[in-house]
Amino acid sequence: YWWWRKNSNESAKEKEKQEGEINSSHGGRIPKGSSGWPFIGETLDFISCGYTSRPVSFMDKRVPLYGKVFKSHLLGRPIIVSTDPDVNKVVLQNINGNTFVPYYPKSITELFGKASILQMNGILQRRVHGLIGGFLKSPQLKARITKEIEKFVDLTMSTWTNNRLIYIQEETKNITFPVLVRVLMSVSPGKDMEFLRREFGEFIKGLVCLPIKLPGTRLYKSLKAKERLMKMVKELLEKKKLKMEKSKDDDEEGFVVADAADALLLDSGESNDMQRLPLDFITGNLIEMMIPGEDSVPMVMTLAVKYLSHNPLALQELKEENMELKKQKANAGEDYVWTDYMSLPFTQNVISETLRMANIINGVWRKALKDVQIKGYLIPKGWCVLASFSSVHMDEENYDNPYEFDPWRWQQQNKQGRSGNCFTPFGGGHRLCPGLEFSRLEIAIFLHHLVTRFRWVIDEEDYIVNFPTVKMRRKLPITVTPL
Ligand code: HEM
């Protein structure tokens, strides 16, 4: 009996350790910290720090007082803020899928709807994630989309004539939006794409607003735009479904999955003992998937241009690497393939460094479904956790001179393997961004054509606004000159 107790205790301990030191029984201590003022807590300081050039200053002020994991009260809720990479990892891993669920402000929850991948949990989230991820990561998609990205890059850059002033934040969206809607639902440039762009712009304006749903309010207008988007996308999916059925009736061999919509429509659900995904569900999810896809990629491109403009040595090395590829391709008389762009080491280091410093998604918000103990801290059931990525990315313990744009650090970092838990611009665990490789490819293609075809100067000094989302104050005006 003693042997059995000892062994079962030990294996239980081992399991706990494996499960990221999660312990649902009481124990540990609630992290130190302050709940701030009644009702508003520390929200005002959180928001005002967010507006500064150092949004992590909210965390930087508290870490020396309370430690890397601390308690606060934000947006009307008690919250635990983690700036510790190991704690963030456990939050992201969400072992067994039932410890942490996404938690977003009320306006976002209203706009997404409960059936959105960004909010759903459990087996359905994994199924949709798997379908989208499988499609976006497939070499067939990458081969095809490379041509499309090149086409939209070319279309945009062909308007950059001598000494033209352009707003890079706008120009990059002219590339990424058409590419995104092609990837998601094969919409081509024209009336439908314009409609999607206009209504989507109206829809996302409501993501950060007061959660009041009365006619005339921001949230109301955004919900109306979503209704119009739903109608249009649903019609499009109905047509796709008919086409799929027809190709089955005609006994056509192997229907080609052209976009994320096809991947979701085609899945019978049998492998998960589930049914087909309903049309309304797919429609809503395609629209919501435009949110992470639409803004983040053009912002990384924009910030890469900003950082490179201030770092001539990095720009020079990037240019040399890309010019070399251009020369090789021209000499061999070959087209580029996606692996050409993805195998440029310095270019990928520039992208990593931009992602680290830009912190487009500065962290994730979760709610604990049960008491959780991590590294001796207790996160009580019902409390929220903010796993701050930006704090980890800008911490001297993880990166030397974290405020310096230094793409060369990744040569070291990769060798030391130090980047693991400390680099999470795309999140991690079951929710690791399914668009990771696709985004890196799109940014690499943009940078290649930018540095091999143009030089530029910053027209007017611009600065980053970090709140509510990362943006350039003046959309980054630059003057371009073809080489
Ligand atoms: C540089 C660009 C991007 C960044 C930095 C980024 C970042 C992230 C992060 C941090 C998450 C995790 C959110 C969480 O854990 O709650 C996420 C999830 C997601 N991303 Fe991305 N993303 C980018 C581009 C894209 C693109 C282009 C797409 C689609 C084509 C996309 C689709 C998604 C989806 C569907 C999810 C939800 C996954 C799930 O919850 O299962 N992302 N992204």
Image (cartoon, grey):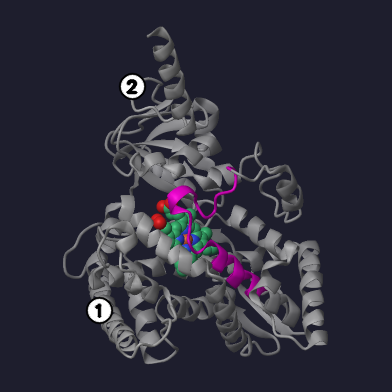
Q: In this view of the protein, which residue sits in the foreground, 207 or 377?
A: 377
In 3D space, how far apart are the residues under numbered discs 2 and 1 (Cα atoms)?
48 Å
Is disc 1 surrounded by few (<14), some (14 to 19) or many (20+) residues within 10 Å? some
* Residue 430 on the magenta span: yes
Quadrant that contains the C terminus = bottom right
Q: Relative to the observer, which residue lies in front, 157 or 212?
A: 157
* Secondary-structure class at tag 1: helix
Q: Residue at x 58, y 72 (%)?
A: 442
Q: Is residue 218 left or right of residue 187?
A: left
Q: Give the magenta-colored segment's residue range.
A: 421-447
Against 359, is 328 above or below? Answer: below
User: Which percent across, then down, holds residue 418?
Assistant: 67, 42
Camera-near label (2 vs 1) is: 2
Q: Amino acid at mark 1?
A: Arg
- Please give left or right for residue 254 compared with residue 474 in the image: left
The amino acid type of the residue labelled 2 equals His
Provide residue 388's location: percent of width, then percent of height. Answer: 49, 44
* Disc 1: which residue: 228
Q: What residue sits right under mark 2 in the picture?
A: 26
Q: Residue furthest left?
A: 214
List x then y, in percent, for residue 385.
39, 39
Is tag 2's residue or tag 1's residue first in the polypeptide sequence? 2
Establish if 138 lies above or below 210: below
